[in-house]
Amino acid sequence: MTSPQDLLARVAELRRLLEYHNHRYYVLDDPKISDAEYDVLFRELAVLEREHPELDDPNSPTRRVGGAVRDGFEKRRHSQRMYSLDNAFDVAEWRLFIERIRREEPHAALAFWAEPKLDGLAAEIVYEHGRMSVALTRGDGEEGEVVTENMRTVRNLPLILKVPEGKDSSVSALPSLLEVRGEVVMLKKDFHALNDRQEEEGDKIFANPRNAAAGSVRQLDSRITASRQLRFMAYGVGDVRWDGGAQTPREHWGTQAEIMAALESYGFTIPQGAQRFESPDGVAAYYERLAAERDSLPFEIDGVVAKLDDLHLQDALGTTARFPKWAMAMKFPAHQAETRLEAIEIQVGRTGVLTPVARLAPVSVGGVTVSNATLHNEDEIRAKGLLIGDTVVVQRAGDVIPEVVRPLKERRDGSEREYAFPSQCPACGSQAVRLEGEVAWRCVNASCPAVVRQRIVHFVSKAGLDIQGVGKKLVEQLVREGRIKSPADLFGLGVGELSLMERMGLKSAENTVSAIAKACKSASLERLVAAMGISHVGEQTAKTLARTYRNLDEIMLAGGDELMALPDIGPEVAASIGVFFANEDNRALLERFRGVGLWPQAEPGDESVPGGVLAGKTILFTGTLPDMSRPQAAKLAEAAGAKVVSTISKKVDYLVAGENAGSSKLDKARALGLTVIDHAAFMRLLDADLDVAGDDQPAEGRAAKANQQQLSLI
Ligand code: IVH
């Protein structure tokens, strides 16, 4: 039996070792142990933490895999404003900036700290007594969103500050408060791998690494953030304090270079290539050099940021309302190239919109081969005056989706032809229509094969019901082979039929059928509304509707005025909802959903949680649960109004014990007289809500009834 002291020491040792090896791997790029050895240490710590929840620590390396799932992000003010930067677009503008400084500070030597301008999402990470306490997005500079759990999953970010080498290993070598500012980025290779995965699963494709990084930081499910390979590059500090001495930040650090060296010594990654220049000319040369090298860097940059190195000089110059007078962002021009516009083709989207796409002779634009570019709509082709066969300028502003900027009219030789936008859908041949006030032409044939395919792809994707293992490729194959024509057909697919398809064995056919059945049984109203593909109804509107109405019948009955009274719903969205439910085909589809049991009743949202079956109850999960992860179980419990905690105490109403639940936790629970239930009993507890939904018993009463009749106490 290990003594409590030995246990504590081992847990502390494992946490220290894992942080050390994490830093070697992700920051120094110089691992000292293999992945397998790392995993062994990680698993030992995870087991100890599971068995001893009293040792819980939000900064444990085990938190790097995520877990918390939230409804939204709380906002918080930055203790010091996060300023923006003034821009220069060439070296001449940089020289004007230098002249402005010289007018104010004629005698000062102007040395600069310069580094790449990273194209990501700005964030601030707060460390109190060396431990990460809060992470905020930049937001509008005054106020950001609290994204602490998500940022804990960013592997190169220290959870506990490293004590600088050569300092005695007490915390006094570290500031008691440190606000680190920097950019969250996704490396180009991780961005491309993510988009490949998203495409395979029929999910959203990110336009550029910046959007991918921003979308990942603002994920409600921190496990998704953890899977996204984000990196944090520190470029400055906000408030900094030291205990015990009268030291102010300026007494501690006199230059930007010293701040950056300190940040590196605490374990942060700083932007690759950051360096000090003795003169403004050095910065100008650096800008030219980086502009030429930008494509070979592992992350996207859109310029160079130069900051006066001397902090006292920075203070003397001060700021304008929006940016500091001592720093400048020198932006690079967008990547451009010339190529031939070979053809314009039409893509049909899930709402029937016909989008023209430029087919280009392949050309390298900023290191990426471009052969397609969206032209958005008919008006845009006309406004740009494009002819088929034109030599055109294409541009990539850090985006994956390139843009046709303009035709080079002087290169025309008379062989170019005008493009006639089709009046028929290229997929089904039916008449295309351009609705009053809209720029887009649409195919309004509900059974157009292209529309059907895209609708089903959307239905199964993460933005829809998120049916595991049913991706874009499978849907395309099913539609091509005529096995499905509507999302409702998915629920009629049998194992026998699927297993006969190419590249599909019996096992995967079984998995597919069971994933579809599971989605049918467990879909929430919010997900189903989002999955149906109503024009202008995205995830946010779906959430609003699911919070307001109990089921699709109620949404169908809601009139336009009633809908417009809801947050985020204006006349256009309300009209689109009305049109969708008035359509015969859509109503027939909904009846088929009802027929197969896909008719969710709303999970109570924030406002209705007090009425949930577990309202006011506190729940703790331990051990592994069959069929679902702990975060999923926690989400269900929270949706039913419970508060989910991770530490055992007298306040816990139910301890849900899964397999391999630690015996010490169970003993402690019994000693405290808590109700310990198994997973099946937990599910029955939730079901009690559905069984008696609409019953006029108060929720508390229902829970009590379920408690007495159905719980199997362990
Ligand atoms: S310094 C007062 N350094 O650019 C100084 N910003 O336009 C404020 N950015 O919101 C920022 N790379 O997100 C700084 N090396 C870098 C940067 C950088 C990217 C972003 C940052 C900021 C925006 C300002």
Image (cartoon, grey):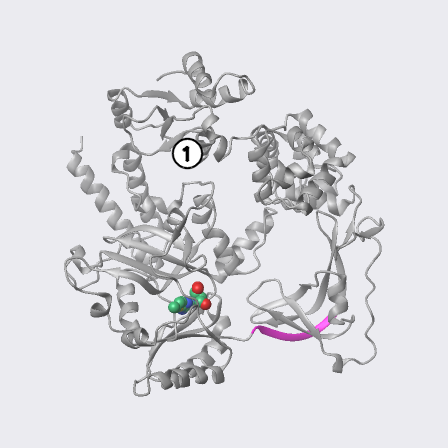
Q: Quadrant of residue 304?
A: bottom left
Q: Residue at x 47, y 40 (%)?
A: 71
Residue 62, percent across and down? Answer: 33, 44
Residue type, label 1: Arg
Q: Is residue 638 magenta?
A: no
Determine the secondary structure under disc 1. Answer: helix
Q: Is residue 600 above or below residue 480?
A: above
Residue 384, percent across and down? Answer: 73, 71
Magenta segment, principal secondary structure? strand
- The residue nearer to you, when weighing 214 against 454, is 214
Q: Residue at x 57, y 44 (%)?
A: 540
Task: Give the mark count.
Answer: 1
Q: Quadrant of the N terminus?
A: top left
State whether residue 497 appears in this view: no
Residue 127, percent across and down? Answer: 28, 54
Q: Is residue 580 above or below residue 520?
A: below
Residue 10, percent across and down? Answer: 21, 42
Q: Residue at x 54, y 17 (%)?
A: 695
Q: Quadrant of residue 514?
A: top right
Outermost residue, top direction? 709
Q: Residues within 10 Å of mark 1 (few under 14, many from 20)?
A: some
